[in-house]
Image (spheres, grey):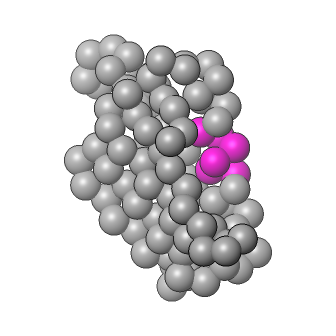
């Protein structure tokens, strides 16, 4: 199962952590893992391509991604809220393979 968690400082998003494996299908054929990975990487790439990379810190390891918010700009907040929206949508479709903690 993949889990994701948001942490806050006051009302501001502080970080998003995504970890685990969906175990929906064999490695390389797991559509849940692919969907979560794609949503996450697209969000990170969008932040970077909009010259906001200094406002986040990203840690990526096998089965683990953490996006820490350095500065809550409208772009960072909007894109990370969209990431959460996407993860929630995937969770609705595959509740046995993805959940928010």
Residue 47 visible here: no
Is residue 85 on the magenta stretch?
Answer: yes
**Extreme residue toward the top, this view:** 25
Q: Position of residue 57 (x, y in %)?
A: 43, 75
23 over 52 or under it: above or below: above
Q: In the rendered view, does 14 fall on the left or right side of 86?
A: left
In which image quadrant can residue 13 be found?
bottom right
Main SS category, magenta section: helix
Residue 23 visible to the viewer: yes
Along the horizontal axis of the image, is 42 left or right of 26? right
Residue 59 figure quarter = bottom left
Residue at position x 70%, y 51% from top? Answer: 82
Residue at screen point 47% across, 71% down: 68
The location of residue 23, given as percent across then percent down, is: 32, 21
Front-most of residues 47 and 24:
24
Q: Is residue 38 above or below residue 79?
A: above
Please identify the quadrant where the N terminus is shown: top left
Q: Residue at 50% of width from left, 42% of height from top?
A: 101
Q: What residue span does the magenta drawing correspond to?
A: 82-87
Was residue 16 drawn as part of the magenta stretch in this picture?
A: no
Residue 50 in the figure: left or right of residue 17:
right
How many numbered circles does the render carry?
0
Residue sitting nearer the eye, 49 or 41: 41
Query: Residue 100: x, y in percent?
Result: 54, 39
* Residue 47 image point, x, y percent: 59, 69
């Amino acid at each position: 199962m993949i889990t994701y968690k948001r942490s806050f400082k006051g009302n501001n998003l502080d970080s998003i952590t995504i970890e685990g494996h969906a175990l929906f299908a064999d490695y390389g054929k797991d559509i849940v893992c692919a969907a979560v990975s794609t949503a996450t990487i697209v969000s990170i790439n969008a932040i970077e391509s909009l010259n906001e990379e200094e406002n986040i810190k990203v840690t990526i390891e096998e089965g683990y991604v953490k996006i820490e918010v350095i500065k809550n700009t409208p772009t960072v907040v909007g894109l990370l809220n969209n990431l959460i929206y996407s993860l929630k949508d995937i969770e609705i479709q595959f509740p046995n393979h993805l959940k928010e903690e």
